[in-house]
Image: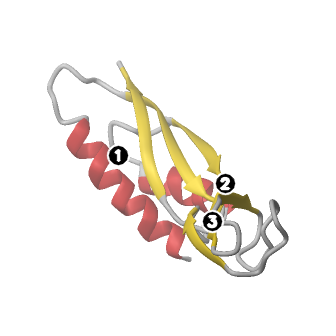
């Protein structure tokens, strides 16, 4: 389950960002997750609860924001949204697509008190 190691990386970033003495607690973390990132959301939620124990983010809400898959179509030269890596271009129906987005995962922001 690589979601555990993903959460460990997130914790390092959150711990570093929340290290300031005026920050008592992290109440919410919002993650942007691309359609092709390969993240199992239920597993990430489980790992979140386990990994955040003992940190300023213990009990913090985890909000996951879905980002679409994107690709450049070499037939019509448009950047389009796709649901699956092998989908045809929704604009022209062409099959020469190069995925160029949707595999990212990043912390968008976090709420602290």
> Which numbered disc flags the more N-terminal residue, 3 or 2?
2
Q: In this view, does 111 lie above or below 56?
A: above
Q: Residue 45 in the image: x percent, y percent? A: 61, 53
Q: In this view, does 14 lie above or below 80?
A: above
Residue linked to disc 3: 77
Residue linked to disc 1: 54
- Marks 2 and 1 sit apart, C-alpha to C-alpha, by 34 Å
Q: Residue 93 in the image: x percent, y percent? A: 85, 71
The residue nearer to you, when weighing 7 against 69, is 69
Could you tell me which secondary element the residue under label 3 belongs to? Answer: loop
> Which numbered disc flags the more N-terminal residue, 3 or 1?
1
* Circles 3, 1 touching at the beta carbon (< 8 Å): no
The residue nearer to you, when weighing 78 against 32, is 78
* Circles 3, 2 touching at the beta carbon (< 8 Å): no
Q: In this view, does 85 lie to the left or right of 98?
A: right
Residue displayed at 35% across by 18% down: 113
- Marks 3 and 2 sit apart, C-alpha to C-alpha, by 18 Å
- Report the mark closest to the observer, 3 or 2: 3
Quarter of the image for residue 35 reads bottom right
* Circles 2, 1 touching at the beta carbon (< 8 Å): no
Residue linked to disc 2: 68
Quarter of the image for residue 101 reads bottom right
Q: Residue 11 in the image: x percent, y percent? A: 35, 52
């Amino acid at each position: 389950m690589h979601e555990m190691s993903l959460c460990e990386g997130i914790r390092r970033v959150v711990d570093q960002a929340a290290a300031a003495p005026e920050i008592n607690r992290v109440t919410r973390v919002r993650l942007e997750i691309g359609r092709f990132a390969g993240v199992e959301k239920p597993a990430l939620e489980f790992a979140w609860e386990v990994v955040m124990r003992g940190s300023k983010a213990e009990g913090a809400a985890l909000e996951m924001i879905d980002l679409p898959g994107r690709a450049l179509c070499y037939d019509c030269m448009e950047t389009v949204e796709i649901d699956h890596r092998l989908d045809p271009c929704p604009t022209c129906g062409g099959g020469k697509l190069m995925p160029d987005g949707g595999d990212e995962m990043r912390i968008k922001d976090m709420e602290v008190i």
